[in-house]
Image (cartoon, rainbow, N blue to C red):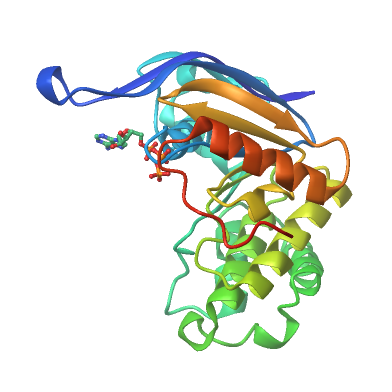
């Protein structure tokens, strides 16, 4: 089943002298169960693309299908249902509510959906175990490390059992141990639950956990790399493509994984 289809999408910001063409005739597809990275130089349009596919923003022209629905044609009410039932987000700044405990932060979005309390508790137990949050449930966000906050953010995103998970630089503020742990959780969820993941990253190490990387440049498709062998080999291919694409790609922490 096709989870994402982007057809000839253009996105412009501003007008006349301030006009920026952030996406310039971009087309691609993502099948169910893929773990896809979006990479490219600074300003290439990665976040703009993620915002459009995840229904946060709209394209100027072009079509975007998500789980079979053409999202550019949906009303605000229909989009709300789509977001609630099909989509999970992991934000770089976590978006945790400081007045709520970890437990409350994780279950809060589901309490608005009418899902039975027993089912919510079952999911909470599952994801807090999978993301190792069991001892942290009664703490407040201010009492957590950055890596712990990111895991809470991931658990909250997964509670609705989204068909697709969107992540923008999810490891951006994590140390390498926390980043590795989060990526291993994402890879597990991708495999076990067949959750499709679309993740924007600058980092080749982070990207090496994906199955496929779409490279974009100047808002247009540039190239893709598909994992076929070891993660080290995939990582090397990603580094090579970053070198080829040029133009403001951040340096990676290391050239080994
Ligand atoms: N709201 C906006 N108004 C005007 N221009 C914008 C807006 N959002 C993005 N842009 C411009 O669109 C282009 C693409 O931006 P975008 O944030 O998508 O790039 P990116 O690939 O995510 O960059 P980075 O890797 O630096 O985060 C850039 O030239 C940016 O300045």
| Whether residue 196 can be seen here | no
Q: Choose top left, top right, bottom left or bottom right for residue 254.
A: bottom right
Q: Residue at x 71, y 38 (%)?
A: 237
The image position of residue 9, as x and y in percent, is 46, 16
Q: Choose top left, top right, bottom left or bottom right for residue 239.
A: top right
Ligand 1 image position (quadrant): top left
In the drawing, does residue 117 fall left or right of residue 51?
right
Residue 9 or residue 178, whichever sits in front: 178
| Whether residue 21 can be seen here | yes
The image position of residue 195, as x and y in percent, is 76, 44
Residue 108 or residue 252, whichever sits in front: 252
Q: Choose top left, top right, bottom left or bottom right for residue 36.
A: top right
Q: Residue at x 56, y 65 (%)?
A: 108
Residue 154 or residue 216, whichever sits in front: 216
Quadrant for the C terminus, please: bottom right
Image height check: is 171 above or below 233? below
Count of marks, rendered view: 0
Quadrant for the N terminus, please: top right
The image position of residue 44, as x and y in percent, is 42, 33
Residue lying at the far left of the rendered structure? 17
The image position of residue 53, as x and y in percent, is 52, 31
In the drawing, does residue 169 fall left or right of residue 183?
left
Image height check: is 234 above or below 144? above
Residue 33 or residue 249, whichever sits in front: 249
In the drawing, does residue 93 fall left or right of residue 202?
left
């Amino acid at each position: 089943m096709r989870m994402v289809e982007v057809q000839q999408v253009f996105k412009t910001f501003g007008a006349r002298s301030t006009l920026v063409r952030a996406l310039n005739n971009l087309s691609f597809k993502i099948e169910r169960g893929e773990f896809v990275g979006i990479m490219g130089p600074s300003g290439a349009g990665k976040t703009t693309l993620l915002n459009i596919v995840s229904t946060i923003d709209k394209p100027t022209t072009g079509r975007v299908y998500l789980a079979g629905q053409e999202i550019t044609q949906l009303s605000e009410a229909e989009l709300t249902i789509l977001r609630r039932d099909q989509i999970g987000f992991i934000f770089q700044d976590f978006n945790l509510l400081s007045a709520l405990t970890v437990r409350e932060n994780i279950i809060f979005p589901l309490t608005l959906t009418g899902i039975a309390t027993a089912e919510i508790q079952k999911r909470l137990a599952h994801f807090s175990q999978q993301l190792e949050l069991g001892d942290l449930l009664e703490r407040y966000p201010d009492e957590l490390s950055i890596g712990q906050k990111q895991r809470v953010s991931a658990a909250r995103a997964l509670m609705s059992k989204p068909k697709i998970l969107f992540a923008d630089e999810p490891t951006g503020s994590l140390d390498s141990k926390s980043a590795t742990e989060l990526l291993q959780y994402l890879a597990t969820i991708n495999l076990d639950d067949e959750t499709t993941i679309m993740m924007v990253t600058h980092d080749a190490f982070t990207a090496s956990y994906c199955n496929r990387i779409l490279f974009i440049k100047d808002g247009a498709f540039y190239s893709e790399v598909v994992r076929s062998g070891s993660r080290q080999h995939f990582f090397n291919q990603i580094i090579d493509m970053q070198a080829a694409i040029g133009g403001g790609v951040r340096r990676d922490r290391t050239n080994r994984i």
